[in-house]
Image: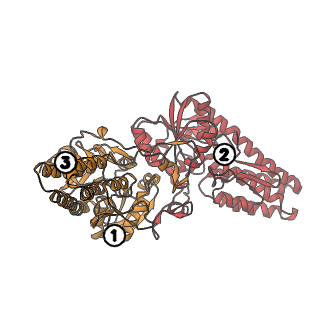
Chain colours: A orange, B red
Amino acid sequence: MSFFTLRLAEGGVELLDQRLLPREERYLLLKTGEEIARAIEEMAVRGAPAIGIAAAMGVAVELARTRDENLAEALARVCARLRATRPTAVNLTWALGCVQGELRGMLDAGAAPDEVREAARALAQRLHDEDVAVCRAIGDAGAPLVPEGSQVLTHCNAGALATAGYGTALGVVRSAAREHRVRRVLASETRPFLQGSRLTAWELTRDQIPVTLITDSMAGALMRRGEVDLVVVGADRIAANGDVANKIGTYSLAVLARAHDIPFYVAAPLSTVDLATPHGGEIPIEERAPEEVLTFGGRPIAPEGVGALNPAFDVTPADLVTAIVTEGGVVRPPLGPGLARLISR
Amino acid sequence: MSFFTLRLAEGGVELLDQRLLPREERYLLLKTGEEIARAIEEMAVRGAPAIGIAAAMGVAVELARTRDENLAEALARVCARLRATRPTAVNLTWALGCVQGELRGMLDAGAAPDEVREAARALAQRLHDEDVAVCRAIGDAGAPLVPEGSQVLTHCNAGALATAGYGTALGVVRSAAREHRVRRVLASETRPFLQGSRLTAWELTRDQIPVTLITDSMAGALMRRGEVDLVVVGADRIAANGDVANKIGTYSLAVLARAHDIPFYVAAPLSTVDLATPHGGEIPIEERAPEEVLTFGGRPIAPEGVGALNPAFDVTPADLVTAIVTEGGVVRPPLGPGLARLISR
């Protein structure tokens, strides 16, 4: 791949600033946990798996700059700060849980400060590398679901840019495209942040996978015209019963897919499944600033004084999901038991 | 009302340039049929009823500047030019048909040139004034469909700005709001041209009717959360069987409304009904330039070389429409016979 989403570098975390794409490819070098927390909040990096990894890297860089005697306190503080950045994606909580648990254990066991710092770095690197492997496994598991010559509709960006590389939904697309099954990807632009037009179109073009942009509002009409063979999206959190929180607009696509008898697939690592959340109604949905809807590139597009809603995610009930594609294989309904079985392995 | 959409003025047609709203309220003075044709093509004026009236005014201003001996030729030419501007809205064809038929008849009967010019002007003015009256009748007929305290979802702009005044879908909203039945209007922004955020939000704010913007992708999630009591939209053409062509995204909203048992109303003048088009599959759907999707305010939002689809309209089949609100009353299914009955009156 000709770009990377994020990596541990000397002196910090290097991270492609996704706010500037596709206009400009600029890498940020973030040197503190706070800088990484802000990059997550402001969506310089986004996508459930990617923000989990960014957070783990944030812990590593923060501990690297902390005095020996403050390590335990810094660990607790930076984890709390990073955890508070965005509420919906469970990967953030999951990754921070792994890292904090492991490092806290080492500190409690009296490990040497540099040993803890090294472990933090190694853990973040491992999460990164495992994520790429997981995405490839998701892609390969999902590729057979894509019939020859398919037009694949996807929403938002569940691609290399949302993960450590390869992508989840776009991992399925990449693996299917390698087998020449993809006629084209229909990328919905995904207002208000335009992850579809800015990110999905960019990374698929980079990989020479045919992509055509549509506005979010066109999906239904294209389905009715027979121009969508399947829908595949990512997930920010999957509840124990298989309900899926994902980018706002996903639920509408699932309803439309069902109305047109089109398969609706969710591609996500098992770390996205939150067994502690029984159903989608319990998933916290982030409400972002109305300005994202009311302005464009800093310029107002609505009259002054008008309000806007801006829920960043919605919940698709399990019964609208044809299957969930994970690194452990394809889970078909009933999704809850299927996911539980895979996770318990 | 503190603004007007278009009017016949001394020396031309005055028309609010809707491309500049809400940033700037600038009125254009268009002096030729060609200038008006371009204003329609470039969407300085848009909305099915409004472009019909603009076209009729275009004929009047063109004949006013034409020499006596060329009147018949100019009439045929300007009508053909105006008819070719946009294919989907039948009001354009309808208004031009009225005007051309009447004036052609006068010319054939040997009417004096100034008499024909005066008639063109009077016809355009009559279409304008009748449209306002028709919109008020639509609004008053539809108001009882809006329960007390309703949250009303609308798409695009079927408002005063899409008509000679008052609006069709927003006519229903205005009449219902006068009776204090509207808790708020949820306006979907309507990509790519943003008629929702730029126009609907603007004109409702002007009229002090509470309006909240959403992206097009939020509609399903809001319906699921119980935040939409009814949907009301306009129409660009209604086929004889009740299939409705309207702004792209309308069909998705109709499917979503059905899935949530929410009434889906279409508000339109009877001049929008095209008995010569048996069903929606026969309605020509305008495909506009991909640049409208790929750029924003002239700035690219997608990587170079990426294509986009840009159908400006879609077709909602009659069986998803709860009722059509016309100036002759509310038509319930079966829509085809109901519409035919009203028109034959």
Q: Secondary structure at mark 1?
A: loop
Image-based side of A301 in relation to A292, left or right: right
Pointer 2: residues within 10 angstroms few (<14), some, or many (20+)?
Answer: many
State the residue lying farthest toward the left. A109
Q: Nearer the viewer, mark 3 or mark 1?
A: 1
Image-based side of B93 in relation to A136, left or right: right
Q: In whole angstroms, how far apart are the C-alphas of marks 2 and 3?
A: 54 Å
Q: Is residue B72 visible?
A: yes
Q: Nearer the viewer, mark 2 or mark 3?
A: 3
**Amino acid identity at mark 1:** Phe
- Disc 2 designates what residue? B163
Q: Is residue B147 above or below residue A311?
A: above
- Disc 3 designates what residue? A339
The residue located at (84%, 54%) in the rendering is B117
- Disc 1 designates what residue? A3
**Amino acid identity at mark 3:** Leu
